């Protein structure tokens, strides 16, 4: 495998990988976009320039720790707001605390937004809705 400086988009085999700088409290870290899928965990703020890199997503996995504000993670309301702004066809909230009761919380989410859940359907550890 070749190491890449993760500042600009690069190709990795058949995939286009786009680094997504985000804030994790005071620190800048990276999420990644791979073609039309993005994965961002450990985020408290997404800069406007990064939001621009996230337009046109099909699926996004986004940090959502719990309902109340946190210094280094998105709350449920913040995650929902970012998901709406980004407009991915499907957004799965990840990195959740046990404080978010699944059925109750899922009922609060608009169409296209879901709590990611481990499934035992056989396709993988994390099922994206099969």
Image (cartoon, rainbow, N blue to C red):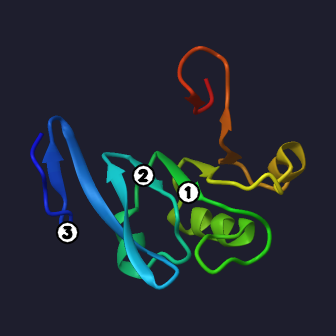
Q: Which residue is mark 3?
A: 7
Mark 3 or 2 closer to N-term?
Answer: 3
Mark 1 or 2 closer to N-term?
Answer: 2
Farthest-out residue, top = 122
Asked if disc 1 and disc 2 are in contact, CB closer than 8 Å, the reply is yes
Q: Is residue 82 left or right of residue 52?
A: right
Q: Which residue is mark 2?
A: 38
Residue at the location (67% across, 26% down)?
119
Spatial distance from mark 3 to mark 1, Cα to Cα?
20 Å
Q: Specify few, some or many for label 1: CA neighbours under 10 Å numbering under 14, 14-19, or 20 or more.
A: many
Q: Position of residue 46 (x, y in %)?
A: 48, 75
Q: Which label number is shown at residue 62?
A: 1
Residue at the location (51% across, 53% down)?
88
Q: Nearer the viewer, residue 34 or 30?
A: 30
Q: Position of residue 10 (x, y in %)?
A: 15, 54
Mark 3 or 1 closer to N-term?
Answer: 3
Q: Specify few, some or many for label 3: CA neighbours under 10 Å numbering under 14, 14-19, or 20 or more.
A: few
Q: Secondary structure at mark 3?
A: loop
Farthest-out residue, left = 2
Q: Position of residue 84 (x, y in %)?
A: 61, 64
């Amino acid at each position: 495998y070749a190491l890449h400086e993760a500042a600009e988009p690069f190709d990795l085999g058949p995939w286009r990988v786009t680094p997504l700088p985000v804030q994790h409290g005071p620190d800048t870290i990276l999420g990644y976009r791979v073609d039309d899928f993005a994965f961002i965990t450990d985020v408290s703020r997404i800069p406007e320039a990064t939001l621009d890199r996230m337009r046109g997503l099909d699926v996004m996995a986004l940090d959502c720790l719990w309902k109340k504000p946190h210094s280094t993670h998105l709350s449920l309301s913040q995650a929902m707001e970012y998901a709406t702004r980004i407009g991915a066809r499907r957004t799965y909230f990840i990195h959740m605390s046990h404080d978010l009761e699944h059925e109750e919380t899922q009922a609060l989410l608009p169409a296209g937004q879901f709590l990611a859940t481990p499934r035992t359907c056989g396709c993988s550890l994390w099922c994206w809705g099969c």
